[in-house]
Image (cartoon, helix red, strand yellow):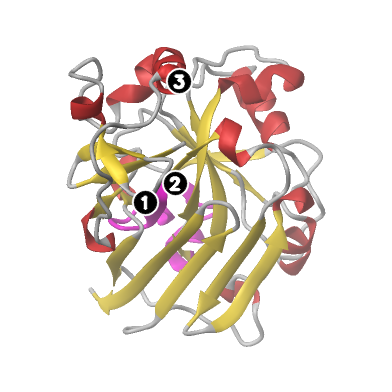
Amino acid sequence: MRLANVDERLMVARTGGGFVDLATASAGRFGPDPQSVYERWEEFADWAGTAGEWTDAGYDPPVQSLGAPVPRPRQVFAAALNYREHAAEGGFDAPTVPQIFTKYPSCLTGPVTEVALATDKVDWEAELVIVIGRRAYMVPRDAAWSHVAGVMAGQDLSARDVQRTGPTPQFSLAKSFPGFGPTGPWVVSADEFGEEPAEIECLLNGELVQHASSAEMIFSVADLIEHISRITPMLPGDLLFTGTPAGVGARRDPPRFLREDDRLLTRIARIGELTQVFRAA
């Protein structure tokens, strides 16, 4: 099952292709707000599994009409240094416990966007993003996936100069400028996506700059949910950016940062792709 935000209305993919408006297809049982379905995820998933084929024709939305599939999460968690080669390229040892920071929800956007270059040190970070579908608190690792509604592709865009301002890193602020959280192109439900590893790719102006499998994570999705939920509840509709592979611009020799008119493509197998074009602020 795939859920998209089309012009701020929740659409669900038909088996035969295209999307249908959920509020219409469910005769009003579920509303049009793309965020609200996660508060009723189990009820929605049960209904969707027994609703049969949608009766109305599928609609193929233009990519420009796709918004952030989960537009207003209460919390956005993110994992740092969660791939060994990425840790190594920064001169760090692989962490022995998950390194977690937050992004502010106001940075989230849809899959096809223009992004203003807030500084001259903006970097890319392709990531698998998890959507929480059931409140998770003190969740053991083997039960973690039962709390997941679905997955998306994401970019954790980062202003490295802001990140490194002062004596300690400024992760959250550096990664939360407007447009610094592209997500999508839709939510792929956990049952459709499965728990098999997925290939992650990032291309800058057609050049492959990141390529890895999610199997290379130091801490799996289940590990991260277990760790975070021991400390704070993860709420329905919350997001978890699971970390980026090696190949970011700041760790190249010489460093390489995003420039005006650059085109960044992020692709994750079994999900889809994002495209960002960068403009001067």
Which of 196 and 165 lies nearest the eye of the viewer? 196
Q: Which residue is mark 3?
A: 45
Mark 1 residue element: loop
Compared with 249, 233 (above or below) is above
Q: Earlier in the sequence, mark 2 or mark 3?
A: 3
Compared with 273, 204 (above or below) is below
Label 2 with label 1: CB-CB less than 8 Å: yes
Which of 119 and 180 lies nearest the eye of the viewer? 180
x and y, in percent, of residue 173 in the image: 39, 50
Q: Which residue is mark 2?
A: 172
- The amino acid type of the residue labelled 3 equals Ala
Give the magenta range: 160-186
Q: Residues within 10 Å of mark 2 (few under 14, many from 20)?
A: some
x and y, in percent, of residue 214 in the image: 70, 51
Q: Which image quadrant for residue 260?
A: bottom left
Left/right of residue 14 with respect to residue 65 in the rendered view:
right
- Distance from label 3 to label 1 (Cα)? 31 Å
Which residue is at a point 47% across and 21% down the rendered structure image? Answer: 49
Left/right of residue 173 with respect to residue 84 in the rendered view:
left
- The amino acid type of the residue labelled 2 equals Ser
Left/right of residue 206 with respect to residue 26 in the rendered view:
right
Compared with 195, 113 (above or below) is below
Q: Which residue is mark 1?
A: 176
Is residue 56 covered in magenta?
no
Label 2 with label 3: CB-CB less than 8 Å: no
- Distance from label 2 to label 3 (Cα)? 33 Å
Which residue is at a point 37% across and 40% down the rendered structure image? Answer: 14
Question: Which is closer to the viewer, label 3 or label 1?
Answer: 3
Numbered marks: total: 3
